[in-house]
Image (cartoon, coloured by chain):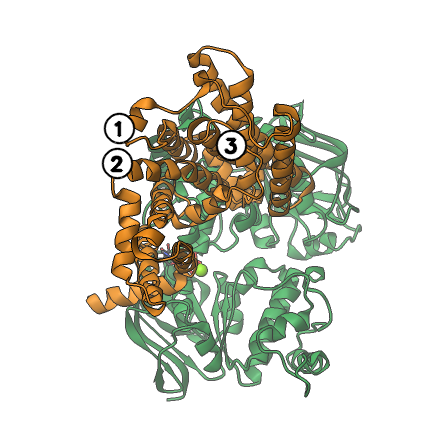
Amino acid sequence: MDYVIEMLNIRKEFPGIVANDNITIQLKKGEIHALLGENGAGKSTLMNVLFGLYQPEKGEIRVKGEPVKITNPNIANDLGIGMVHQHFMLVEPFTVTQNIILGKEPKTKIGSINLKKAEREIQELSDRYGLKVDPTAKIRDISVGMQQRVEILKTLYRGAEVLIFDEPTAVLTPQEITELLEIMRSLVREGKSIILITHKLKEIMEVSDRCTVIRKGKGIGTVNIADTNVDELASLMVGREVSFKTDKKPAEPKEAVLKINDLYVKDARKVNIVKGLDLEVRAGEIVGIAGIDGNGQSELIEAITGLAKANGGQILLNNKDITNKSPRKVTESGVGHIPQDRHKYGLVLDYSIGENIVLQTYYQKPYSKNTILKPKEIFNKAEELIELYDVRTPSVYTLARALSGGNQQKAIIAREIDRSPDLLIAAQPTRGLDVGAIEFIHKKLIEERDKGKAVLLISFELDEILDVSDRIAVMFDGKIVANVKPEETDENELGLLMAGSTTTKAGESK
Amino acid sequence: MTSNNKFMTFMIPVFSVFLGLFVGAIIMIISGYNPIEGYAALWRGAFGDAYTIGETIRRTTPLILTGLAIAFAFRTGLFNIGAEGQVIVGWLASVWVGIAIDAPFIIHLPLAILAGAIAGGLWGFVPGLLKAKLGVHEVIVTIMMNYIALHVSNNIIRSVLTDHATKTENIADTASLASDFLSNMTLNSRLHYGILIALFAAVIMWFIIQRTTIGYELKAVGFNKHASKYAGMKVGKNIILSMVIAGGFAGLAGAMEGLGTFGNIHVMSGFTNLGFDGIAVALLGANNPFGVVMAAFLFGTLKEGANEMPTGAGVPTELVDIIIALIIFFVASSYIIRWALLRFKKEGK
Ligand SMILES: Nc1ncnc2c1ncn2[C@@H]1O[C@H](COP(=O)(O)OP(=O)(O)OP(=O)(O)O)[C@@H](O)[C@H]1O
Ligand SMILES: [Mg+2]
């Protein structure tokens, strides 16, 4: 019996819901153990119990065979348990080193902070696991992927033997994902053990040794990855067969809904990042934008939706000029937007689900009349949508903050699709969703298309782009450099185009 | 979680008050006073007869309004330290209108009250505007606005409203909130109709915050600016609006003093403290309008009752300030109390 961590028969309740019902998970030393389950199944809750953020109502936790009580994260740290949260907890203006040593500063003889020593140690750790982190860089200057590695270093610096990753790949680009999986392998080679939460079955198949599945708060069992496959994992988790290929009839594009001519947008550093972009999305088609993160996709969306200023060019919606109109005007002229960053833009976390459902429509009938809100109408609408979109929440009065990540995302999607806008912009709409929910959302996007709406899909996942789009626009260096049909291309060709290669079909007519 | 939270937001202030009184008793014992006599005197001072009851309510009136001024801003993510200055300009403006204008009661009184609210609102508008347009933190600006209010008001009293006097003449009867009826009923206390206005203001705050699209926007902006912008709300406009409404409440508090309690305005050597006490009232009232009413009443009681403590039990009034400070301290360290209460509940199970 050489389990480093055992969580036995854990039960954790929240008001109105049993998040963990008698779940058992046992982690062997030196293994990568995946934790799989639908949105709201209770994965994050279980890991927060292990990390000392929640106290279980029942059950036992053992570390190396010894029963322990983990009442706060400091105790977890002392027991060698580290957690890489999905939302990083870093101080932006500080350097990597300052962030890592925060609260555990090494001292010189006279009692001041020994920054040099810390930097050396962090450099060593970084080299040992191939993290390639610069200890002197400021957090605000490094990419999301690098920030995540800083979080990893933080746990290692504090002596973690067991690392918990909660959906680490949801925020990463495909390239960064490959690197992260490599880092995980080198961590276990050095004797660390890892619990990995992810919705991407491919990743589980690729790196993990075993996988524990939970469904609606109950443990379903643990399987050896060597003896299973993607389809079995999916059906274990959802409790039914899941189809990975989306069925759809060919698109019948009609008139142009969105027309962008020669658009220029500046980024936060006031440099042009969208540089003379042309794009057209027609009624009844889904256009997927493929591109490596940072080529101007976010700024493009912000310019269309009025969140950022265009400093050149023109955006037409149904032949009406909406360039530099306010977000409210843009929304009212028929644009829906599933934002990439759900916590920053998509939700007011301290509002209830019901209040979030009317975030753009609260001032309209029937949700209010003469500035007086109609709570009944608001919450009835919310009831209807959580039912329809399978948002798992104890009630519509629950704060958005208390929902699981995937269910928060589903609530946003429900709100945006339900308005049935002429143009639906979906930025990473399925980030953090389980396979069943992804299937459902894809169906909904296609339904909108079939109703004659225009859909603009932005995703870093080529699978999703290839699967759902009717036409793919490849974005590179602030421009659309190629328009291709999904059935006439593949990941390799897309990859080349996204990297700026102009050999193949670039320049083909729009 | 929510029902449990509501219970806690209610229990923590109540518990803090008892803890404050309890520690206050210990301090009295240590300093050689009899706490039972002390609190008995406090009670007599606040509720002993009709007069003290009237005075307690009169004291409570402006505290409700300044409490609302801070609570309202706070609910929308802003920290309004400027209630003090807003009180002063509200006081000045209402008295000015009360003196300068000749009109029948039905026009004069509402006009004078409105003048107070508008002046306070204007004093809130400036920090709101600076925050919305230039990102200057409202705490800094509101603190400075307090000093500007104090000195500008003193100057206007001396050189505009009077000829170097320290006190203006009294407002016209048509602008007065004072009531012979209330006064006679309470043995000639200074109780006036303002309490009705203050209670009505609490209902107004509740209604705006909970039931209107304005409140929905204000709170959303306070919680998450990015999401509010995404949803099409004008973030800057809402920040300004929140400060104006908050300032309006504080301005009303000034009007209560000017039109109700004093009937004039005098040169002030220092702040009225109504605005600063409002911060404590809002904190104790958990930024809830009805909580604010109750907290203001408690503060009014303590402050009015304190008057009786030196004569009645030989306890210095400063002790009441210590007890108030203790209560605030316990509310502020609610973490400890939350912990203690949870402990208590678990053991009880
Ligand atoms: N702080 C909380 N208060 C109330 N309910 C909560 C809280 N945290 C989680 N829940 C509920 O517990 C259940 C499990 O949530 P959890 O976050 O563990 O799901 P998850 O498996 O991580 O899902 P996802 O894949 O969407 O992240 C959900 O129904 C959620 O609404
Ligand atoms: Mg989760």
**The C terminus of chain A, quarter of image:** top right
Q: Chain of mark 1?
A: B
In the image shown, does B75 or A40 lie closer to the viewer? Answer: B75
Confirm or reject: label 3 Cβ below 8 Å from ligand 1.
Answer: no
Residue B141 in picture, x, y percent from top left: 64, 43
Residue A235 in picture, x, y percent from top left: 37, 60
The mark found on residue B50 in the picture is 2
Instruction: Assign a secondary structure to mark 1.
Output: helix
Which residue in the protein does label 3 denote?
Answer: B251
Mark 1 or 3, nearer chain start:
1
Seen in the image, is A8 located left or right of residue A35?
A: left
Mark 3 or 2, nearer chain start:
2
Q: Colour of chain B?
A: orange
In the image shown, does B98 or A445 lie closer to the viewer? Answer: B98
**The N terminus of chain A, quarter of image:** bottom left
Which residue in the protein does label 1 denote?
Answer: B185
Mark 1 or 2, nearer chain start:
2
Q: Amino acid at mark 3?
A: Gly
The mark found on residue A150 in the picture is none
Residue B237 visible, this orientation: no
